[in-house]
Amino acid sequence: MLRTQPTFSINVEVEIDYGQVYIYAVPPWANDGKQGYDAMTEALNDAWQSHRYVGLADGLIDLVTPVQWNFHAPMRIEVWPAEPPADDDNWDHVVDVDLDVPYGQLCFQASGGRPAIVCEERVPSGTYRVRVSGRGYTAAKAGAEGLDAYRLRLWSRSGNSRPVLRKSWPGWQHAE
């Protein structure tokens, strides 16, 4: 039987600054020990070079947005028992990536040195595939404020998978 609802969901507000929000469960700088290494820069480079605009580095997801800033961006977090049904047509941009959440804690941090927003409600610990979705991009790029929204859909994975760009916002072609 295909489940049409998540088993767990919460809504949070995240901050976007400099067109980015970092998503992580364990800060990659907490114990990386690599001299001169910067996971944030690596994830940003991956986002742009891959043309996914969702980059990865050492457990850090860098969600790049056409929104320069939004300090009250809605983010819905859903946990599913299996891969959720596709609804890509309802979103401007959709990317699937892997994320480990060993302690049930998700953090969101705007670029530019803003403090992390720690999600107060814990998600079940696990190794997840995550569908990162964003919408309101065209209106936001045109100057409208506060019309962008985001969602993370998590479901258990048994191995590692490459990131997959499911849907690309056409405005990215003019952003580079």
Image: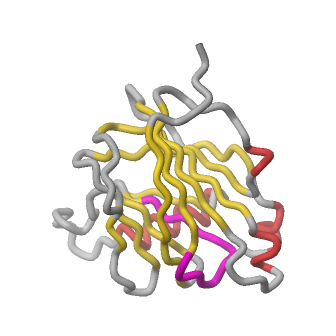
Position of the N terminus, as image quadrant, is top right
Residues 49 and 11: in front is 11
Secondary structure character of the magenta stretch overall:
strand
Is residue 80 rendered magenta in the image? no
Q: Residue at x 22, y 48 (%)?
A: 103
Q: Residue at x 61, y 57 (%)?
A: 50
136 sits left or right of 151 in the view: right
Q: Position of residue 121 (x, y in %)?
A: 33, 56
Is residue 69 rendered magenta in the image? yes
- Boundaries of the magenta span: 61-72
The figure's colour scheme reads: secondary structure
- In this view, the residue farthest toward the top is 1
Residues 53 and 126: in front is 126
Q: Residue at x 46, y 78 (%)?
A: 110
Q: Residue at x 31, y 41 (%)?
A: 124
Residues 136 and 42: in front is 136
35 sits left or right of 68 in the view: left
Position of the C terminus, as image quadrant, is bottom right
Q: Position of residue 24 (x, y in %)?
A: 36, 59
Q: Position of residue 21 (x, y in %)?
A: 49, 71
